[in-house]
Amino acid sequence: MAAVVNRRCGIIFIGLSGIFLLLQYHSKGITYLQTPTFATFELKTCPNMDGHALIASRGVANERVAIVLAVDSVDNVLDYAPAMNTTKCYAKHFGYPFVVINLTDAIVSEQCQHKDVFFKRHCAVHKWMESRKDVIDYVLYIDADMGVINPCHTIQEYIDDTADLVFYDRFYDFEIAAGSYLAKNTYFSRNFLKYWADYNFKLPKSFHGTDNGAVHQVFMEQNFETPSEKFACYDLWNKSRNYDGLFAFQACTQWKLGLNNSKFADNKLKIIRKDAVGWVRDGWLTSTKWAPRDFMLHGWKMKKLGGEWQWPFSRKTFDMEMCLREPLLNAFSYNLNFVVSDAVIRAELDAWRVKVVDKLIKSLKSIGMA
Ligand SMILES: *[C@@H]1O[C@H](CO)[C@@H](O)[C@H](O)[C@H]1NC(C)=O
Ligand SMILES: *[C@@H]1O[C@H](CO)[C@@H](O)[C@H](O)[C@H]1NC(C)=O
Ligand SMILES: *[C@@H]1O[C@H](CO)[C@@H](O)[C@H](O)[C@H]1NC(C)=O
Ligand SMILES: *[C@@H]1O[C@H](CO)[C@@H](O)[C@H](O)[C@H]1NC(C)=O
């Protein structure tokens, strides 16, 4: 893609009568300007990036970092169109391969005979990574309803050189999220994904929470040495009958792994905890409000539009024609009502965090821990 070099990220020159600056703040060097007359959201520049970010950053070429998602029917592709359009646009602009794995495809189904699509998707990603190990160094796997809100971030920002596989904690409970991870294309990562997917074949006969429950048990087994440590919480999983039971199991695993630890399995595994900033979070936590530090938001399903989330752009649909033009941010024409500062978002997320820690401790006490 030779055109890559000529594209510029986010430098806009608009001749606005820039007298009426209602709001101007800086975060990470990004400047947002609002005028009362035009209500123009102007992302003047992404100083954290230069033209080079369109080719590589932190020593990793964009063409070797794939954004991968998995879909299982035409129906869900329509439901995910708003989110997928933004991610595809972002990927196109930066030259990240954008890969949609079709889970009902015959070859995928032959390779991954998992009955539960939630497990099947991790198998499919594992196979895909294996087949591309010479050309793809990192995979950002995302749920198809995760969309890019602020393209002034590179995926490489979230790479941790010591960790092969990075997950994140959800804010509204104490789960490790199963819907997105950043994987270095190593044997460790691929093996983790395969091992996790294959839990489909040995799930306890309980309210197990599919891949989201299983990822906690896989963390235990990858992190600890002895069977008694690895299976220290298994009983809770095995006897779980409802969400409370599942949460008790998850709370137990978080406690054993160490609530304040973020590295596991000899540092090969990492969890981005709630006090840090990951690449994605649930958008509804802040009622679609977002700030410069945000990169992606989760939960953009067509069906839930107007309820759980609001359309954050000023144009009704996302114009894919603008993705290869400069500046990219013309494609992301923002509805300013949703733009706030990093401090506002942080405060709202911290409020969630405090509530959830309380809940976690309660759950642990109910099972005689903590
Ligand atoms: C996935 O593949 C199946 C079988 O080839 C096809 O019928 C379906 O339309 C594809 N789905 C998408 C979303 O492309
Ligand atoms: C899981 O629970 C069942 C009873 O529901 C029991 O028969 C089985 O042995 C338990 N498995 C483990 C590994 O604890
Ligand atoms: C985790 O860290 C917080 C803040 O530093 C501290 O208050 C808490 O006691 C720690 N929890 C555990 C289980 O170590
Ligand atoms: C997504 O992009 C397609 C064009 O590729 C467009 O037809 C559709 O309206 C867009 N959908 C949304 C919700 O932006």
Image (spheres, rainbow, N blue to C red):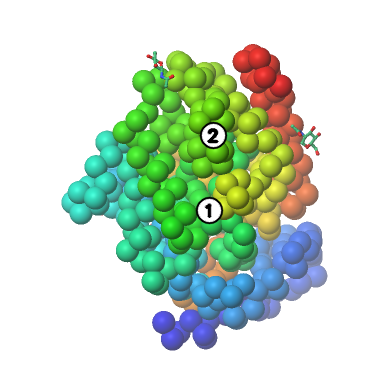
Question: x and y percent of residue 368 in the render?
Answer: 66, 14
Amino acid type for the residue under numbered disc 2: Thr
User: Is residue 255 depicted above or below 323 in this figure?
Assistant: above
The reply to whether discs 1 and 2 touch (Cβ–Cβ < 8 Å) is no
Q: In the rendered image of this protein, does residue 316 appear above or below residue 65?
A: above
Residue placed furthest toward the front: 226
Q: Which image quadrant: the C terminus? A: top right
* Spatial CA span between label 1 and label 2: 22 Å
Q: Nearer the viewer, residue 224 or 217?
A: 224
Characterize the local packing of mark 1: few (<14), some (14-19) or many (20 or more) Cα atoms within 10 angstroms.
many
Q: Name the secondary structure under disc 2.
A: loop
**Mark carried by residue 201:** none
Seen from the viewer's position, the closer of residues 295 and 308 is: 295
Question: The N terminus appears in which quarter of the rendering?
Answer: bottom left
Q: How many marks?
A: 2
Q: Is residue 324 among what the camera can see?
A: yes
The residue tagged with tag 1: helix, strand or loop? strand
**Residue 87 at x, y = what percent?**
47, 59
Amino acid type, callout 1? Leu
Q: Which residue in the protein does label 1 denote?
A: 165
Residue 31 percent across, percent down from the top left = 73, 67
Q: Residue at x 69, y 35 (%)?
A: 259
Mark closer to the observer (1, 2): 2
Residue 226 marker? 2
Of labels 1 and 2, earlier in sequence is 1
245 lies above or below 227: above
Label 2 beta carbon less than 8 Å to ligand 2: no
